[in-house]
Amino acid sequence: MVSDGSEESLATNHRFGLSDRLLAEAVRLLEDSREAPLDEPAAEAQSRARADDFESRIIIRAARLSVGPSIRAALHRMATAVGTATILGILAAFLAGTGTARLMFDTAPAQPVNFFSVLAALLGLPTLALAAWLLLMLFRPGLPSFNLFGGLAVAAARLGLRGAPPNAPALQAARATGVLFSGSGPGLWLVGGISHAIWLSFLCGATLSVLFLLGTRQYDFVWETTILDADSYRAIADWLAVVPNVMGFPAPDAAQVATSQWTGGGLPDAGARRAWAGLLIGCLLIYGVLPRGLLLAICLGAAWRGRARYRLDTTRIGFARLRTRLMPTAHAGRVVDANSWDARDDTTGPERPLGTVGPVAVFALEIEPPVSSWPPPVPGVEWRDLGTVDDRASRHRLFAEIEAVPPRAALAVCALAATPDRGVQMLLSDLQARHRVPVVLVLTGGSGLDATRGARRLDDWRKLAEHAGIRSERVVEVDLDRPAADGIDRLARLLGGTA
Amino acid sequence: MTASPLRLAVVGHTNTGKTSLVRTLTRDIGFGEVSDRPATTRHAEAAVLLADGREMVELVDTPGLEDPIGLYDHLADRLEAPRADWPGLLREFVDGDHDGGRFEQEAMALRQVLACDAALYVIDARDRVLGKYRDELDILGRCAKPVIPVLNFVAAGRSRTPEWREQLSRLGLHAVAEFDTVVLDAGSEQRLFETMRVLLNGFRPTLDALIADRARIRADLIAAAADRLADLLIDAAAFTVLVPSGADQDAALAELRRVVTERESRCVADLLDLFGFRPDDLDSDALPLRNGQWGLDPFNPEALAQFGFKVGGGAAVGAAVGLAVDVALGGMSLGLAAALGAGVGAVASGISAQGQRIADALRGVSELRVGPESLRLLAARQTHLIEVLLRRGHAAQDRLHLPAASGDWISGDLPAPLIRARAHPEWSRLAAADPLTVEVDSARLAAQRDLAKLLHEQLCRRP
């Protein structure tokens, strides 16, 4: 699963090559086999400084880790090993091709050569392998297309790594190379290219050898059969000859095919010699060398292109988990404006006694008045309802009414659950200081809160009352929707109503 | 085009969740201080949002406004002086002594608003709509900067979002964003930035880049989580312990349980790390996860019951063993592997493996594997965990209540890639297999890819 990077990253990431990315993959595999990613802040910082996008940072980090150089060296050795193995393979295939050809032409002097068995020996195996490769490529791309070679390769790798400790760089290099070759992309094409090169080399060896032999000795070509008849062989020869004819190679015609049947003795038609030879060379070249050569060119071209377009798959967990370290989505915590004030105690007026004559002003501060019991059901108290206060206009109205007819006390009803703020505090302290009206604070609505929150809020309100100059006895917590008897009693006592 | 970042002042009444908002947007669990008490934040602290490694948006967290009415009165007195206008007045106020320090908090907030490109006005949507908030918005409006109201805690039970929207539109504020810093809805962060984009034309490219980056990161996270989970499931499904006849099956069973449980813990640790959480960050969630560990191992019938799996009667040890493990003889899997159509090379290796199996069966060796219920439980637990991680804001302090675990895994057959995995013991890394061969096995890679795609779809289907 190669991720398709955004257009940007495809364009800008040409600064890194395949080897850099392989290094990053090897590091990922190393970290996968450990508990957690390698913790090297220096490498991370460098990667953040030198690049902007995620993939580049991963690559730079991998290069700057302390294991980076050793893994890179191991990858290099790996590449050299693969190259050497390929060259050796090509040489071996060439020799095998020449050897096979020689073997097939190695008959007693003046004995004819069985045309179709030579063709089968030289072309049979390569063609089967080609068909298998094509099928696999078409139907299951991604499967290693060289299972024979793959097994050999893995065995060779294991041999080479025998005795290496589990975290050895060579092991990670081998794993990374393995991942490259087994995925889609350049690895697949490279592997295909190697197999085509080896078969091509075999076929070239065979062809050159055949050419040499045909040029320097005289051979007669025959065909023989036990169960088939001449017509089928003529058909086969014609069918084989279709493409070579087009390319200008001579081929035996019907009469020559008929006369070339091996009859146990006597020399076949000499004129057919050249025709059969031409057909042989033509088949080798057109059904053997040419397809392999073309495919080799295609594979190499695709591998070259894939190499440039190869990108790390950042959705693999080994890379994705680096995101929080390499691509932080935020910097935090720069103080822009430092606090220089302390909580102050505002000046509050002198302690005033709650009067005994006249109605008590009551208002709901930033709260809906409890519908069921408004004014509060305190027996023996005459109420002067000043409504709800929750914005500037209503606050000014409140002050105006109080100024016009100063009450003996003011009952402020607030919600226990609300967050007390300085605005409320200033209102209450203004009432006491500027308007000289003593204030009793009632906190309602507490039955809906859970115990800890309720306690915290009560504490906050008490602090606020203190700052506003309200004595703690004048802070009463009673839920006016469900008034508890003791709360009402306390209010009654404070406000001078008869109990 | 390196434009300077968009600067936003995060203002609002005290204790409305301004710091939580910044913390959630920055995914930084350590930003500022969050508590339930009033006036928690006391300085103006800035955080920068990055995308593609570039600075995009600077958020300035301010102390809460507490006394807008007093402030308004204080300013209104001065307004009567000739040739005084609001912006000038505000600047004077901010640079002055704020009435002897009485309005220091408000001054700090206003100073930031005047210095920034726009203000995010944060509202606790659970509060009643009070007149004093109107007064606050009035003052903010006079700073001549775009004000974007952000309703916070919209996912809470008693939030009053429709009321707030109505009141805000009466004040002419129609572009209102909704957010919840506890439950991170996939789209709400994007909608917040899109709302900003509407009002801040000049910063469109910046916000577009930010939105695209966040969406890409989220998609990558889901894909990576799915990949990791697929890896775990394949390892667990393929893991096979061979027990020669006459040997102690219980010991092998215990070993199997231990290895699989440990692998699951590593997966959990990886997932937490992927999303930027520490092991103990999820302790308060409605998940039976403590300090990065599931309390019960995946073979325990109670663990199955916890996630809604039907536990076939009897909690006897025998039944538990039956649930956890099945004992398979070689013959069962032969047809299966061939029928699933492996490729040329794979069939060859499959035949050799089956040959080994048959030989083992003849010798009386039995295979212990993880049972399908436990595999499904592994999938269900980790999927639920990923969903929690996707939705948990970094400012959440309370329990996160999510709908019950998805029913996708509770019943039904195992998905095809897992069935394939059960036939390939060489795919499991738990058996101390040679890492060289396990990773390059294309069939395993293909199975993991398929499973990851399936999981990805499941995760994207949930809101």
Image (spheres, coloured by chain):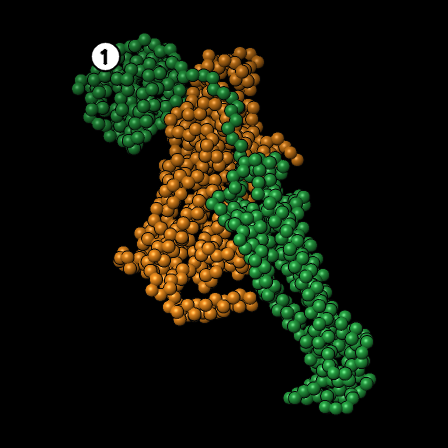
| Position of residue A283 measured from the top left corner of the image (x, y, whole percent) | 74, 74
Q: Amino acid at mark 1?
A: Thr
Which residue sits at x=41%, y=36%? Answer: B396
Left or right: residue B277 versus residue B326 is: right
Please tell me the colour of chain B: orange
| Position of residue A412 measured from the top left corner of the image (x, y, whole percent) | 31, 20
In front of the other: A359 or B136: B136
Colour green maps to chain: A
Which residue sits at x=65%, y=62%? Answer: A192
Q: Where does the N terminus of chain B fall, quadrant-wise?
A: top right
Left or right: residue B318 versus residue A48 is: left
Which residue sits at x=49%, y=54%? Answer: B452
Q: Is residue A233 above or below residue B263?
A: below
| Position of residue B86 measured from the top left corner of the image (x, y, whole percent) | 54, 19
| Position of residue B77 measured from the top left corner of the image (x, y, whole percent) | 48, 13
Residue hosting label 1: A356
Q: Is residue B129 above or below residue A31?
A: above
